[in-house]
Amino acid sequence: MKAGAEIITDRLLLRHWTGSTTDRTAFHRLFSDPEIMRFFPQRLARAEADALLDGLFPLIAEYGFGWAALCLKDKEDPIGFAGLMPVRFKAAFAPAVEIGWRVLPEHWGKGYATEAANALLRNGFKDLHLDEIVSFAVQDNHASTAVMKRIGMIPEPALDFDHPRVPDTHPHLKPHVFYRLTRADWQKKRAAD
């Protein structure tokens, strides 16, 4: 999603984050809630989450896209985030653009991550002209891998990896599974639907 743009689906609005108190509160919760963060090595304090959010603005300006606030279409308050972001660590599959999402627990099980991700794939392949989009998650994060499968991503076990940004103090969170979708495969899937 290009800087300044919005993506609207049947039920959702993806928009860029602002510096508003509402956005900052939601962003902090997405990085501090114990249920949401069980597959991540640390929860962030409010100041850390604010710094992370502030760091998104120059990344979006640099790359032209990034993590977006995920809102219900008729409300402005974020219920999560979803977006495309260049992979910013060394990996066998990099350089690459990652698709990702995170949703507040009270909105789990409603298909919002899948709906947002499908819209982002369309945006990435049609508007941003990406050749491929990747995704990865802790191997035990079955909710995320289920979304990856639903949106047509293909597992590539040969590229599963230990995430370099997960500290050794959390060995159960290091192993990540890797999925990829090329523009050609996305177009074939759409033609078959």
Image: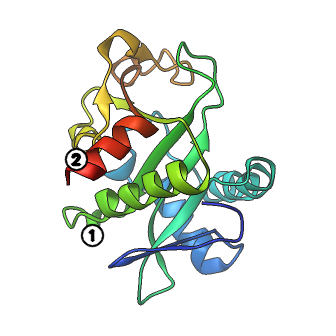
Residue sitting nearer the eye, 171 or 129: 129
Q: Residue furthest bottom?
A: 74
Displayed quadrant of residue 40:
top left
- Could you tell me the amino acid type at mark 2? Arg
The structure residue drawn at horizontal position 19% and vertical position 62%, both measured from the top left corner, is 109
Q: Give the mark, 2 or 1, whose residue is nearer the N terminus.
A: 1
- The Cα atoms of the two marked residues, 2 and 1, are separated by 21 Å
Query: In the image, is residue 33 above or below residue 40?
Result: below
Along the horizontal axis of the image, is 23 left or right of 105? right
- In this rendering, the answer to whether 9 lies above or below 103 is below
Q: Which residue is mark 2?
A: 150
Q: Secondary structure at mark 1?
A: helix
Q: Position of residue 60 (x, y in %)?
A: 73, 54
| Numbered label attached to residue 121 | none
Given this view, does label 2 or label 1 mark the residue nearer the observer? 2
Q: Residue furthest top?
A: 158
Q: Nearer the viewer, residue 158 or 106?
A: 158
Pointer 2 and pointer 1: residues touching (CB < 8 Å)? Answer: no
Give the residue type that dot 1 points to.
Glu
For the rendered model, the colour scheme is: rainbow
**On the image, numbered disc 1 is attached to which residue?**
106
| Residue at (44, 15) in percent of width and height | 162
Rendered location of residue 41, percent (x, y): 46, 33
The quadrant where residue 119 appears: bottom left
Residue 42, image x and y in percent? 49, 38
Disc 2, SS: helix
The C terminus sits in image quarter: bottom left
Residue 49 visible somewhere in the drawing: yes
The residue carrying pointer 2 sits among few (fewer than 14), some (14 to 19) or many (20 or more) residues within 10 Å by Cα, namely few
Query: Closer to the camera, 62 or 18?
Result: 62
